[in-house]
Image (cartoon, rainbow, N blue to C red):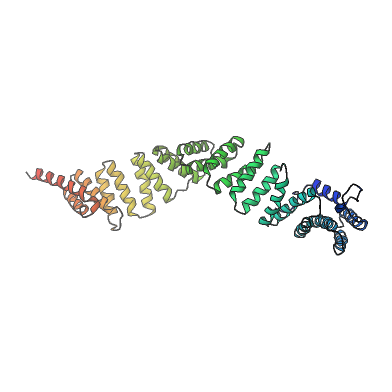
Amino acid sequence: MRFNNLISVFYCTAVLLFCISPATAEQEDQYLLSNNVYEVVSDSRELMDQNEFNQAESKLKELLSMDISPYEMAVVNQTMGYVYIAMEKYSQATSAFIKSVELNAMPDEVNHTINFIIAQLLANDDRNKECLVYLNAWFAKETNPKPEAHMMAATIYYRLGDFGNMILQIQKAIDKSGKPEQGWYEMLLAGYYETNDHKNAAALLEKMIRQYPGKDIYWLQLATTYQLLKQYKKALAIYELALKKNILGEPEIIQLVHLYLNEGIPNKAARLLNDGINRGSVVRNVDNLELLANSWQLAREYDRATEVLKELAKIKNDSGIYFRIGQVYFEQENWQNAIVSLELAIKDEKLINIAEAWLLIGIAAYHNNDLSRSAKALNQAISYKNTREQAQWWLNKLGDRMNEKSS
C-alpha cells in the first residue's frame, strides 16, 4: 500500500500553517520564528503550491545548515517532511518528521499529529515495529481515535503476526463505526482463524451472512467452521442450503457426502455423489468412485455398488476391489458370484484381507453346496489368527453336514 490519502489535507495544512505563522505577543518564547526563518518557510510553502518542490527543498536545506533554535529546526524539518511527501520521497519524509518530533520543541498537539503521520509513513515502508512506537504514542494522547486508525493498527499487528492485538483493534473499529466495511469483518474472521477461535468465527460468519447473503464463500466457510467445532448437524444444514443455492464445488460436495455418511444417511450421500459424477461437477476418478461404491453399499443398494466396483476393477487391477465385489455379492447371498470374485482376490498373496477372503469363500461354498471347496477354503482360513475361531466353527458345521450325507 503506497502513501496516498492516509494523511488528510486538513492535518497537513493546519499543522504547517500553525508552524509558519509569524510570532505574536501572546506566543511563548519557545514558539517564536525569526524573520529570516519565517520568510524562507513561507517561500517554501509558496513554492510547494507551485509544484516547485526542488527549489523548496533547496531553500529549507540551507536553513538546516544554519544556527537556528530547536523550535525553528523542528518547523523546518516538519516543512521538509511535507516537501518530501509531495516529491514521493517517503523515506526522507519519515526521517524529517522524526527529527522534528525528537527535538521536542513543537507544541504537544503538533507533535501528536506528526506522530500519526510518521506512523503512516513507517507502515507504508513496512517498518512495522517502528510504526507501532509512534502509533501507540499517538493512541495514548488521542481522546477518540477514529475507526480507520484502529484498522491501521490492526493491519500492523497482522503483519507482525500479533493476532490477539489485531483482533482487539478491529473490534474497536467495528464498535465505533456506524457502518463497518465488509473487509473489516473479513480481516477479523482471519484473526479468529489464526487464533483457532472457531466459536467466534462461526458467530461472526452468521452475522456476515445476514448482512451479505449473496457472498457465497461465507456459507462455505461457516459450514467448514461448524465441522471444526464438531457441530456436524449444523454443518450439514448449511451445506444443504448451499447445495440449494448451487454454490458447492467438488470439495464441498465431497464434504457433504462424508457428513451424510457420518450422520447415517448413506442413501443421500450416494445419490448426491452419483449425481455430481454424472453431471461432471465431481471428477470420475478412483477415489470418488470408491467413495460412491462405499455409499451405495452402506445404503444397501448392492446392485449399484457392484456396478461401480466393476468399473473400478477395469480402471485398476486391484485385488482389494475384487474382495469388495465379493463382499457385496456375499451380503446379497449371491454365493456363486461371491466365490468367483473372492477367488480372483486371493490370487494376490499380498491381499490385506486374505484371511477374511478365505473365510468368506468357505462360507459361500458351504451355502452353495460345494463342500469340497468349502473345506479347502476354511482350512486356509484357520491358519490365520483373526479368522481361526470362525473358521473352526464352520469346519465343525461342515463336518456335521458331511457326516449327515454319508449316513
| Image-based side of 105 in relation to 309, left or right | right
Which quadrant of the view contains residue 76? Answer: bottom right
Q: Which residue is drawn at 12% across and 44% down?
A: 400
Comparing 235 with 207, the one in front is 207
Picture coordinates of residue 277, whole percent (x, y): 46, 44
Q: In this view, does 323 lie to the left or right of 362?
A: right
Q: Position of residue 313 (x, y in %)?
A: 36, 51
Say which of 161 and 206 sits in front.
Answer: 161
Q: Which residue is drawn at 18% across and 46% down?
A: 393
How many marks the image carries: the answer is 0
* 148 sits to left or right of 59: left
**From where the camera sits, is residue 37 visible?**
yes
Q: Is residue 226 left or right of residue 326?
A: right
Instruction: Spot the residue most to the front.
Output: 29
Q: Which of 3 and 268 is in front in this view?
A: 3
Residue farthest to the left, as pictured: 407
The image shows residue 191 at horizontal and vertical percentages of 58, 47
Image x and y of residue 148, in percent: 70, 44
Picture quadrant where residue 55 is located: bottom right
Whether residue 126 is visible here, answered yes or no, is no
Q: Is residue 189 above or below residue 134?
A: above
Residue pushed farthest bottom?
Answer: 65
Q: Observer-nearest residue: 187 or 335?
A: 187
Query: Which residue does the image show at 36% across and 47% down from the upper left?
Result: 309
Q: Quadrant of residue 261?
A: top left
In which quadrant is the C terminus drawn? top left
